[in-house]
Image (spheres, rainbow, N blue to C red):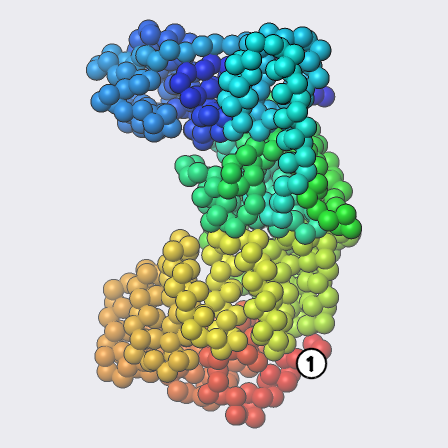
Amino acid sequence: MQEPSHEAEIVRFGMFEVDLQAWQLLKAGLRVRLQHQPFQILVLLLKCPGAVVTREELRAKLWPTDTFVDFEHSLNTAIKKLRDALGDDAGNPTFIETLPRQGYRFIAPSKRVKLNLGDEHRSAAADTHAHKAEIEGPASARDFISVEHFPSRWRERKFWLGVGFASTILLASILLWRAGRLTNDAASVKIESIAVLPLDNISGDHSQDYFADGLTDELITALGQINSLRVISRTSVMHYRDVHKPLSEIARELNVDAIVEGTFSRFGDQVRITAQLIQTPSERQLWAQSYRRETRDVFGLQDEIASGIAKQVQRTLRPQERTTRASQRTVSPEAYEAYWKGEVLLDKLRPDSVQQAAAYFQEAIAKSPDYVAAYNKLAGSYQILSNMGSVPKQEGHLRAKSLAARALEIDPRSGQAHAQKGWDALLYDLDFATAGAEFNRAVELNPNGVEGHQGLAEYYASVGQTDRAVLEIRRAQAVDPLSYIVNGDVCQLLYFSRRFDEALAQCKANLGLDPQLQRPLWQIGPIYAAKGLDDTAASVFLQAYERAGAPSAIMAVLKSGEQKSGFRGMWLAVLQIENRDINKEKYDPFFIAVAYTYAGDKDKALICLERAFDERSFGITYLGVDPTFDSLRSYPRFQNLVQRMRQPQ
């Protein structure tokens, strides 16, 4: 149940306002992103303006004795962030004065206003309620004007224009006229793309960050069900956690028309969220709401927020477009928490972290047996682990296939489950017809789902339609522009299309996205090799080994081979290093096939490719289009292998 909030408190100083109920700092009506501890310090200073708040008081309030932090560093950092947000100068302060070795004092004039509110679902779109509390006029006129009509950046203009008129009747007329005008403006706003920024966790408990991330993702998923609305994926928006940039700049980087941002706090079994929809580049606030729920109602909460946003966005959609909202199933808070702990670990893409993630997804399923998202992620975890060699290929495939099937039993309209089924068909079964059908279905059900577009692109490449593959991966890139995995796929598919210069440009751009810098290098090396630039390719591969942490002894062998015989010599050295595992048959046959191909031993390369086919090694699916093996294409043995792969398995 929604609980009414009867009173809100606003503190004004200079161009700023602090909403003590919504925990927001506004400057000229626009929200300023401020982390929790700096905001707490501001609130403490505003409680007693002009008085000194000692360092000991701040320590007791923000860093109690059982908190193990460097207090001096933490306090100085928080004060600096607060001053940055206010544009204040420590040497010549306007707002916050430092008293050396004592504490801090708020020195600017401030005004505190209490507001009576009838409903916590009030629109915060302009916070014009703060000004209405000061305007003396007929109650009927004030009540008639819905605050939903006033974007926050227009708030000061309206108020100061209003108080310039003596007649409250004239004031009401002006406000009513502008309210109607803004309603029409909102209806004419063209929003075709949107990004949901990570909700700010203002509860003071950083262990709840994963919960805030989960709510962010649920909003993205819900909004993604609106046809023809491009919604940026979670992977890309998470780059903006704790990033202090103007919303217009973020919108430009993500190429979107609007931004959703908000705050999250959790205390016991209560969850509170504020959210607002901002049109860019004007940063005009179109909608905002504040919500409070019990934790067990978290899915209903995110769905209600998404519905409020969708109502605003749908005004801009063509009449024939319709929204298809996926049905939401009840999931316990404990399962939800386990799921999002797993999601955080899965993002790290290390064998140990993926195994830990799988355990959390399994826990989520145990607590909520119908949790479709957990089945999908657990299936994906097994697939990743099998590709990494952490679990046997067949075992990983069978587990993933069974989990995807169960997800589809629970919810046949799960786009992610259809995509997972497509990956199993493509990478292990080599069942291209089923893979194509499942990926197409995933895109149909969730046009903003990256996994559907990404899988469909890989399917097109596998069957030789490389131009269509590039078009499809570009669609994935449009909804996940900062994902190093998606951008890595763009590079790979351009390479498969033999658009080498474009592939090289994309791979070089990826160096700034990928936290593991060696991954783009493993893609850049083959491009130079395909262009006939063997010396440059060898240099790039050596950098890849070095950045991957190869021991100095191995680097010495590789560099010696390169110095003796160039590109071919380096790969002969790779084979020398890998020989021990090859003899023990503990190796990736596809990688060794690449090494033999670059080293010029075509017969052994073909032997390894045949084994890679039998073992379903990652990469074998693209054999027909991979330029790495162009030197083998005239061999009947290679042609037979490609033919076998494209036959029903």
| Left or right side of 8 for 314 | right
* One can see residue 493 in this view: yes
Residue in view at x 71 percent, y 11 percent? 140
| Left or right side of 510 for 98 | left
Quarter of the image for the N terminus: give it. Answer: top right
Q: Nearer the viewer, residue 294 or 444?
A: 444
From the top left corner, tell me how far across and down residue 358 is, in percent. 57, 48
From the top left corner, tell me how far across and down residue 330 is, in percent. 73, 36
Instruction: Name the quadrant containing residue 72.
Output: top left
* Up-down relation of residue 371 to residue 471 (above or below): above
Q: Amino acid at mark 1?
A: Gln
* Up-down relation of residue 376 to residue 18 (above or below): below
Residue in view at x 60 percent, y 7 percent? 136
Quarter of the image for the C terminus: give it. Answer: bottom right
Dot 1 falls on a residue whose secondary structure is loop
* Up-down relation of residue 192 to residue 166 (above or below): below
Provide the residue designation for mark 1: 647
| Left or right side of 203 for 44 | left
Q: Nearer the viewer, residue 203 or 119?
A: 119
Residue in view at x 42 percent, y 21 percent? 15
* One can see residue 367 in this view: no
From the top left corner, tell me how far across and down residue 56 is, in percent. 31, 12
From the top left corner, tell me how far across and down residue 352 is, in percent. 47, 51
Packing grade of label 1 (10 A; few <14, some 14-19, many >=20) is few
Residue in view at x 52 percent, y 29 percent? 153
Instruction: Name the quadrant containing residue 476.
Output: bottom right
Instruction: Name the quadrant containing residue 167.
Output: top right
